[in-house]
Every structure is written in structure tokens, then in C-alpha cells.
Image (cartoon, rainbow, N blue to C red):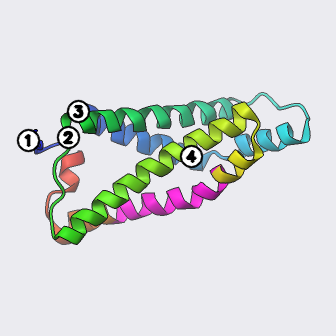
Amino acid sequence: MTAPTAYSRTQKALHWLTALLILAQFIFPDAISAAWRAFRAGTQIAADPLVFAHIAGGLAVLAFALWRLVLRARHGAPPAQGRAWVVQAAHFGHLALYAVMIAMAVSGGAAWFGGLALAADVHELLKPVLVLLVLGHVVMALWHQFVLRDGTLARMR
């Protein structure tokens, strides 16, 4: 299969929807944290639409990440450009992002729906990892756009 020169509209839309969902998960974390503490204490969980939004958002991130991987496998992606080590670093960074997005969604679901405290701990441990990976992703996109000026960011617009 010949590598495409650009991402498909669906790939781009899923990328940006996933980014917005992840951002929302970090902007509104208090409701789910309070609900988890109440659940662990055996007390009544207050009805809060932000709890539902966090759960639905996590499930959507999982679905979108898996959908993106299927699209990538079926349709490919534009090849990374640069030295071999840069291409490998980009590949590793994207692989790590997918792995952590999926692991966070699975661990969050296992904690919430299965009541597994260990899964909640894993979910919490992965939060700063995801933040660092996303920040690295953004920094590298900006580096490509404003320093290298190689058109990498334009492929996702």
C-alpha cells in the first residue's frame, strides 16, 4: 500500500475530537474524583452530569483511539519526515500516546464499573504520563510548524 500524502477527513476529525475530550477530562476532574471517594466510602454518590460526562468522555476516547488505529491500519498515514531517529521518535511518541489513552480508558472503566481500587490507582498514575505525552506532542507540532516549517502540522488541519 502506498502511503497517503495527507490524513483523511475522518482521521483529522477524530484527532481533534480526541484532543478536545482529553482536555475536558483534565479541566473537569473534581466531580468524578468526589464520586469515586463517595463510592469507596460506601456513601451516596451525588447525581452530577459531570460524572456522566467524564465516564462518557473516557469511553469516547477509547472508541476514538481504537477507531483511529483501525483507520491507520486500513488507510495508512503520511510518512514522518526527517532523520531516521526523528522518524523513530515520532513513531514511539504516537505509539505511547495511543497506549496511554487506551490504558487510561480501560483502567478508569475497570475502576468505575468494576470497583477495582488498583485500576483507579493505575488511572491516577497514568494522568501525568498522558499530560507529558500530550505536551510533548504539542511542542513537537509547534516545532515543526514554526522552526522547521516543514508542513507537518498542516497535514492535521
User: Looking at numbered disc 2 in the image, what kind of residue is underneath it?
Assistant: Gly
Pointer 4 residue: 104
Q: Residues within 10 Å of mark 4 (few under 14, many from 20)?
A: many
Reading the chain from its start, which is encountered first: label 4 or label 3?
3
For the stretch drawn in magenta, the main secondary structure is: helix
97 to 82, vertically: above or below: above
Residue at 77% x, 46% y is: 117
Horizontal arrangement in the rendering, residue 33 relative to residue 151 (left or right): right
**Mark found first going from the N terminus, 4 or 1:** 1
Q: Which residue is mark 3?
A: 74
Proximity of marks 2 and 1: CB atoms separated by less than 8 Å: yes
- Asked which secondary structure carries label 3, the reply is helix
In the figure, 83 relative to 63: above or below?
A: below
Q: Amino acid at mark 1?
A: Thr
Looking at the rendered image, the disc whose residue lies closer to the viewer, 4 or 3, is 3
**Marks 2 and 3, how far apart in space?**
6 Å
Q: Residue at x 83, y 32 (%)?
A: 45
Residue 39: percent from left, percent from top: 83, 37
Judging by the rendered image, the residue that carries numbered circle 1 is: 2
Q: In the rendered structure, are the residues bearing label 2 and label 3 in contact, judged by CB atoms less than 8 Å apart?
A: yes
Q: Which quadrant would the C terminus be assigned to in this image?
A: top left
User: Mark 3 or mark 1: which comes first in sequence?
Assistant: 1
Say which residue label 2 marks. Answer: 76
| Secondary element at tag 1 | loop
What residue sits 15% from the left and 57% below the top? Answer: 151
Q: Looking at the picture, which amino acid does disc 3 mark?
A: Arg
Residues drawn in magenta: 123-139
Marks 2 and 1, Cα distance to the nearest angstrom?
A: 8 Å
